[in-house]
Image (spheres, rainbow, N blue to C red):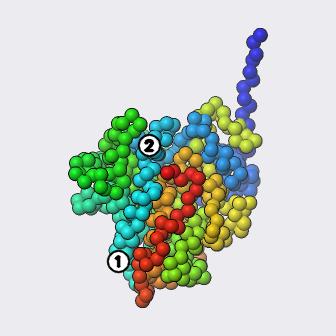
Amino acid sequence: MNIRTSPVLVTLPPGPPLPGPILTGLWIASRKRLLACLQRRYGSTFTMTMSPFGPSVFLCSAALVRQMLTTSPAIAGLGEPNLGNVLGPGSTFALEGPEHLHRRKLLAPSFHGRHLHAYEELMVEETVREAETWPQGVEFATAPRFMRLTLNIILRTVLGAEGEHLERLRELMPPMVDLGARLTLSPFTDRGRSWGAWARFRRMRREYDTVAFDLIDSVRADPKLEEREDVLAMLVQSRYEDGEAMANQEIADELLTILGAAHETTANTLTWAVERLTRHPELLDRLVAEVDGGGSDLLAATILEVQRTRPVITDITRSVDAPTMPLGEWTIPKGHQVVIAIDFVQMDETVFPNPEKFDPDRFVHAHPDTYSWIPFGGGTRRCIGAAFANLEMNVVLRTLLQNYEFRTTCVPDEKWKSRGVSWTPARGGRAVVHRRNTAHTLPHAAPASTTIRRTSDDVG
């Protein structure tokens, strides 16, 4: 007896009937306004087709995020667009399945445990050095200053770079990261053209590879390799399960991933932190009192709240690779993407009461939920450097608050400005600072590493 099975019925959330080009134009004009309008019209889950995502289901509340982020990678894989397009095939962003999991196992020890503690002193040193160049009593944009600071920190902690390597990468990385971030979302996908932005990026990438390969070879030849604490030294010594070492190109791609993705997002979050603190004088006074007294809870909570209210990455994408994927009451077909709007999810009032209020006290002595507080993503693709980034932000802000006074302001909040795949304050996080008479540095306070909040998705 033959039994005929019926095909699974595809059911998609409702969505706007507008053509893709119009939706794309509205997205470019104001992503937030478009999503807010569609959420009011169709609810927190809706479907639309537009560049660069294609046919997609958008999630704008926390309701289905857990189900989506815990779905097997065999069912929902790497979404588009993603940074792997510019970082290279050896980047974690470009890997899927077992290969992706194996790479995470290689990288995880570098960003957790004792290695984090080894980086703290260096972070303080770089923060003090950078802040010495800041103008006193004059308004200035903090964004480029934090970009420079976080790049120096990541170059030293990740690459152990010094001398010529350090100087060449300092010059090359900022324009390369900026162009790469914009190309990630570019509708022009012909990367082989001999002219235009892609050709310019390829020239930068060749120069980067030359520097990176030379640096990798010098690290391999270092007689004190086993004593080094930098991430590059650990990558050079790491081995896959079959005993094979990572190839130079794989390491170069992974280093570019860490340098590009890590330093810019951390710098943008620090810029948002300054923008938020200078508009909340009572909180700023409490933070200064806490760090002077060696405390840590409020500062850690403030960093969490900055990331909740001002996430620098706003979209997580997953592509449906199985014939269908269940998602709540819907059944999503192969070829569709699911886009999680991080900023909307983190404003879900069913999870965060009074969500528009900047209120770090909501996180004092309270861990954020892994699937409603998601500035680092979630599931198997959660940012592997989350603990490192939180440590860095904690150390930098603590050091600045201990040594400098930030003038508060009553001017309106800075608007959001796109930098390709990330968002930053439109006016650069402008601030006025004065050196404190009672300045002192981090070693006098509780170790910053004690304030790092871990979640079940942290690896290692």
Pinpoint residue 407: horizontal percent, then vertical percent: 50, 84
Q: Is residue 385 above or below residue 142?
A: above
Q: Amino acid at mark 2?
A: Arg
Pinpoint residue 157: horizontal percent, then vertical percent: 36, 60
Residue drawn at x 73%, y 40% as measured from the top left:
330
Pinpoint residue 111: horizontal percent, then vertical percent: 44, 55
Q: Amino acid at mark 1?
A: Thr
Q: Is residue 184 left or right of residue 238?
A: right
Q: Is residue 343 visible?
A: yes
Residue density around tag 2, few if under 14, some if 14–19, many if 20 or more, within 10 Å: some
Label 1 secondary element: loop
Q: Is residue 315 visible?
A: no
Q: Which residue is mark 1?
A: 133
The mark that comes first in sequence, 2 or 1, is 2
Q: Is residue 314 above or below residue 130?
A: above
Q: Which residue is mark 2?
A: 103
Residue drawn at x 51%, y 67% as measured from the top left:
450
| Quarter of the view holding residue 375 | bottom right
Residue drawn at x 39%, y 39% as measured from the top left:
240
Residue density around tag 1, few if under 14, some if 14–19, many if 20 or more, within 10 Å: few
| Quarter of the view holding residue 53 | top right
225 vs 182, nearest the viewer: 225
